[in-house]
C-alpha cells in the first residue's frame, strides 16, 4: 500500500529551491519556510478555474489539519509576472487564507523557477488579451525544506491533508 495519496518524489533531481519576491518586496527561498509543510503551486491570478480550485483545496487542507494547520503554508508562484503585481498577488492569495503567500520574479526568474520545477507555462492569445496555459501539479516540501510530493490537481483536500499530516508527524518524530 502506498504511503501517500500524492506521488512521492523524494530525492527528485529538480525543484530544490526558488528565489523570488514576496509582495512586501522581500526575497524568499524554501529555507525561509523551514518548520512548515509548504505546498507550492504555479499559476496566475486571472486563471478561471485551475488556480482558484488549487488554492481553495489548500485552504480546505489547512482547515482539515486543525492545529497542525499552523505548520502548513501555501505558496503561489505566478507564471504571469507582467500582470500579477505584488499588490494583486497579496490580495489574491489572502482571499483564500491570510497566511498564504504569492511570489513573483521578472520574466527570466519566472522561466528559471518554472524550469527548475519542470513546470510548463505559455502565454496563449485570446483576442485582444491573453491567458496562460500552465502545469496544474502542486508540489509539497516537508518541514526540513526537502521536496517530497507531486500533487495531482484531482487529489482531494482530504487525501492531501492526510499526506501533509504524515509529513508533519515525520518531522515531529524525526528519522
Image (cartoon, rainbow, N blue to C red):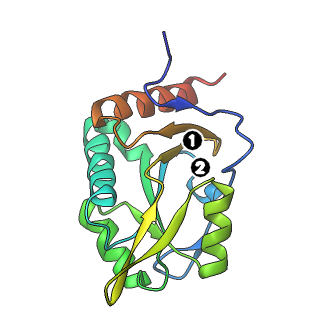
Residue 51 x, y percent position in the rendering = 34, 59
Residue 116 x, y percent position in the rendering = 68, 57
Q: Nearer the viewer, residue 142 or 134?
A: 134
Considering the numbered disc 2 on the image, is that residue within a helix, a strand or a loop? loop
Instruction: State whether residue 80 is above or below residue 174.
Output: below
Q: Quadrant of residue 97?
A: bottom left
Residue neighbourhood size for the residue with mark 1, other residues' Cα within 10 Å, grouped as few (<14), some (14–19), many (≥20): many
What mark, if any, has residue 8 been given in the picture? none
Q: In which quarter of the image is residue 95?
A: bottom left
Q: How many marks?
A: 2
Considering the numbered disc 1 on the image, is that residue within a helix, a strand or a loop? loop
- From this viewpoint, which residue is outermost toward the front? 127
Instruction: State whether residue 48 is above or below residue 4.
Output: below
For the question of whether residue 157 can be seen, the reply is: yes
Residue 40 x, y percent position in the rendering = 49, 53
- From this viewpoint, which residue is outermost toward the right? 13
Rounded to the nearest whole Å, what is the CA distance between mark 2 and mark 1?
5 Å
Q: Do the residues labelled 2 and 1 touch (CB within 8 Å)?
A: yes
What's the residue at 60%, 62% (across, down)? 114
For the question of whether residue 79 can be seen, the reply is: no
Q: Nearer the viewer, residue 61 or 51?
A: 51
Residue neighbourhood size for the residue with mark 2, other residues' Cα within 10 Å, grouped as few (<14), some (14–19), many (≥20): some
Task: Give the residue at mark 1.
Answer: 143
What's the residue at 67%, 22% (across, down)? 175
Instruction: State whether residue 2 is above or below residue 34.
Output: above
Q: Quadrant of residue 154?
A: top left
What's the residue at 62%, 56% (across, down)? 30
Left or right: 167 as drawn, with respect to 85: right
Instruction: State whether residue 106 is above or below residue 77.
Output: below
What's the residue at 29%, 46% (across, down)? 57
Task: Give the residue at mark 2.
Answer: 34
Amino acid at each position: 500500500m502506498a504511503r501517500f495519496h500524492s506521488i512521492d518524489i523524494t530525492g527528485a533531481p529538480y525543484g530544490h529551491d526558488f528565489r523570488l519576491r514576496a509582495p512586501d518586496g522581500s526575497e524568499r527561498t524554501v529555507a525561509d519556510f523551514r518548520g512548515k509543510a509548504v505546498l507550492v503551486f504555479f499559476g496566475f491570478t486571472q486563471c478561471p478555474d485551475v488556480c482558484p480550485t488549487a488554492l481553495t483545496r489548500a485552504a480546505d487542507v489547512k482547515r482539515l489539519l486543525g492545529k497542525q494547520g499552523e505548520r502548513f503554508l501555501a505558496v503561489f508562484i505566478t507564471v504571469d509576472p507582467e500582470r500579477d503585481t505584488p499588490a494583486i498577488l497579496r490580495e489574491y492569495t489572502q482571499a483564500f487564507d491570510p497566511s498564504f503567500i504569492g511570489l513573483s520574479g521578472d520574466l527570466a526568474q519566472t522561466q528559471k523557477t518554472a524550469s527548475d520545477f519542470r513546470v510548463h507555462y505559455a502565454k496563449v492569445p485570446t483576442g485582444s488579451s491573453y491567458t496562460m496555459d500552465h502545469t496544474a501539479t502542486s508540489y509539497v516540501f516537508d518541514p526540513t525544506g526537502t521536496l517530497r510530493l507531486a500533487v495531482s490537481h484531482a487529489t482531494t483536500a482530504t487525501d492531501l491533508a492526510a499526506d501533509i499530516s504524515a509529513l508533519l508527524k515525520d518531522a515531529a518524530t524525526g528519522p
